[in-house]
């Protein structure tokens, strides 16, 4: 199988916290002019390969359930699916990588806004999914955002799930996803749990997951076009 066209990873360190206004402004600029951008490596490097710093981003999410739900609704982001996370703390079931041909290791994350825990694998609910990991500070994520918006609205037979990786505040992530026009559920991973569980070393990352939870395709780096994403969905998820 020929892998989908994508941009290679870059080596830039992750920027610090961004304001909500800057995240939205940069996204608008990316929509107007889509220049070729490489993927964002996470902080740190070893043996020539991008790696994540051992220091995680501190999280100070204090949003109440009603506040988080209202913020998502105002941004046009639907509520998260029932995922069996309950009130447990965010956790990782298994370490390793999201490897093509194997079941996706489960991770329990918060719905964006921090009000409810969701088991990622349970949230898939037996439906093929496109899972996209992004961050408001990631420039290639801003470039591919309109592609995800377009394709997600054109493929009703496939679920889309976003994961905000490493943003310091929920409002930044909610603002970014709302400005991107993503009308599918978003989770947040401020403590980089997916780095350990899925082998995330740079952003963006897209996983195509079959209905039985098997990873059928993985793209590390930004999509070059909406058609490349559509073709991957048709080929790997056998959906249109």
Image: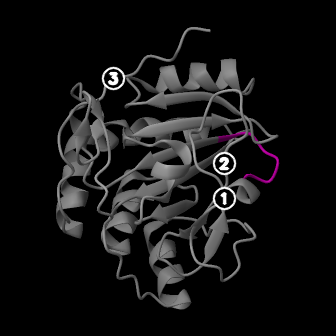
Q: Nearer the viewer, mark 3 or mark 1?
A: 1
Q: Which of the 4 image quadrants contains residue 170? A: bottom left
Label count reads 3
User: Disc 2 designates what residue?
Assistant: 105
Q: Which of the 4 image quadrants contains residue 51? A: top left
User: Whole-percent x and y of residue 153?
Assistant: 58, 42
Q: If you read the primary sequence from the N terminus, does the residue marked by circle 2 or circle 1 appear first?
A: 1
The region drawn magenta spans 124-129
Element at badge 2? Answer: loop
User: Whole-percent x and y of residue 3?
Assistant: 52, 15
Colour scheme: one colour
| 7 to 40, vertically: above or below | above
**Residue at the extreme front of the image, as rendered:** 47
Which is more toward the observer, 101 or 188? Answer: 101
Q: CA distance from mark 3 to mark 2?
A: 25 Å
Which secondary structure dominates the residues rendered in magenta?
A: loop
- Neighbor class of circle 3 (other Cα within 10 Å; few <14, some 14-19, many 20+) is some
Quadrant for the N terminus, please.
top right
User: Disc 3 designates what residue?
Assistant: 7
Task: Inspect the magenta stretch and tell me whether residue 127 lies in it.
Answer: yes
Residue shown at the point (54%, 44%) measured from the top left: 198
Task: Inspect the magenta stretch and tell me whether residue 218 lies in it.
Answer: no
Which is more toward the observer, 99 or 22? Answer: 99
User: Disc 1 designates what residue?
Assistant: 93
Q: Which of the 4 image quadrants contains residue 31? A: top left
Q: CA distance from mark 3 to mark 1?
A: 30 Å
| Horizontal relation, residue 221 to residue 76: left or right | left
């Amino acid at each position: 199988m020929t892998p989908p066209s994508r941009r290679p990873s870059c080596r830039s360190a992750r920027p610090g916290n961004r304001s909500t206004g800057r995240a939205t402004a940069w996204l608008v600029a990316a929509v107007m002019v889509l220049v070729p951008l490489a993927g964002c490596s996470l902080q740190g490097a070893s043996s020539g390969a991008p790696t994540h710093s051992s220091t995680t981003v501190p999280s100070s999410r204090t949003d109440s359930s009603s506040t988080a739900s209202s913020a998502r609704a105002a941004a046009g982001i639907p509520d998260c699916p029932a995922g069996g996370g309950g009130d447990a703390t965010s956790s990782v079931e298994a370490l390793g990588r999201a490897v093509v041909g194997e079941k996706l290791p489960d991770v329990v994350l918060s719905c964006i806004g921090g009000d409810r825990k969701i088991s990622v694998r349970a949230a898939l609910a037996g439906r093929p999914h496109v899972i996209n990991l992004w961050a408001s500070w990631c420039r290639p994520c801003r470039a591919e955002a309109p592609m995800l918006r377009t394709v997600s609205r054109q493929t009703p037979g496939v679920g889309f799930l976003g994961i905000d990786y490493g943003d310091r505040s929920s409002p930044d992530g909610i603002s970014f996803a709302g400005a991107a026009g993503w009308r599918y559920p978003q989770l947040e991973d401020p403590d980089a749990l997916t780095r350990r569980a899925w082998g995330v070393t740079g952003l963006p990352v897209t996983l195509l997951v079959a209905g039985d939870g098997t990873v059928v395709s993985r793209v590390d780096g930004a999509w070059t076009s909406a058609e490349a994403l559509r073709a991957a969905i048709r080929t790997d998820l056998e959906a249109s």
